[in-house]
Amino acid sequence: MAITCKLVPYGSAAYQATVELRDKILRKPLQMVFTAEQLAAEHDQVHVACYDGEKLVGCILLKPIDQGKVKMRQVAVDEGVQKQGIGTIMVQFVETWGRQNGFQLIYCHARAVAEPFYTKLNYRIVGDSFIEVGLKHWLMEKDL
């Protein structure tokens, strides 16, 4: 397995494939669907797609917040390849991108089930847990 990550343009066929993957992994299990407004709001975000050869296996969105802070969102790895290190490769890719683009801090709203994954990558919990999309989440951050 040779995983490669790359930026994909908003609105492209590769972007559309990431929307379908995010829908399958993150939305459908919660009986949620993307709205046109939610997808339109992604036009100024950084879209990362990760491939095993030609097959899309994961994706992440990055939303620059201010001069030094970027939010990692919508992290998804396809079901058949979870727990094989793809998430780690993706997060390391976006951390490198963040450093190269002048960001000092990356953060996310991590689902409680993903908290051990982010902790292992040296993210720290900030504050108390909260409910988002009906699930327990933690604000987690890491200095770049």
Image: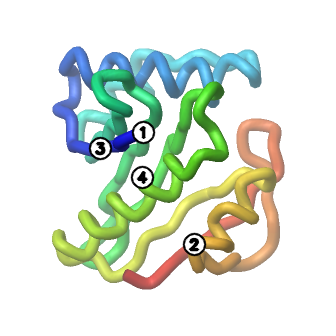
Residue underneath mark 3: 4
Residue at the image point whose x is 81% and y is 65% from the top: 129
Q: Decide: marks 1, 4 in contact (CB < 8 A)?
A: no
Residue at the image point whose x is 79% and y is 58% from the top: 130
Dot 4 falls on a residue whose secondary structure is: helix
Q: Mark 2 and mark 3: span between their CA atoms?
A: 19 Å
Residue at the image point whose x is 18% and y is 72% from the top: 100
Dot 1 falls on a residue whose secondary structure is: loop
Q: In this figure, what is the number of numbered marks?
A: 4
Residue underneath mark 2: 121
**Amino acid of disc 2:** Leu
Q: Decide: marks 1, 2 in contact (CB < 8 A)?
A: no
Residue 45: x and y in percent read: 28, 45
Numbered disc in front, either 1 or 3: 1
Residue 3: x and y in percent read: 36, 43
Up/down of 26 relative to 61, above or below: above
Q: Which mark is drawn over residue 90?
A: 4
Q: Decide: marks 4, 2 in contact (CB < 8 A)?
A: no
Answer with the quarter of the image where residue 57 lies: top left
Q: Which of marks 1 and 2 is nearer the N terminus?
A: 1
Numbered disc in front, either 3 or 4: 3
**Amino acid of disc 1:** Met
Residue underneath mark 1: 1
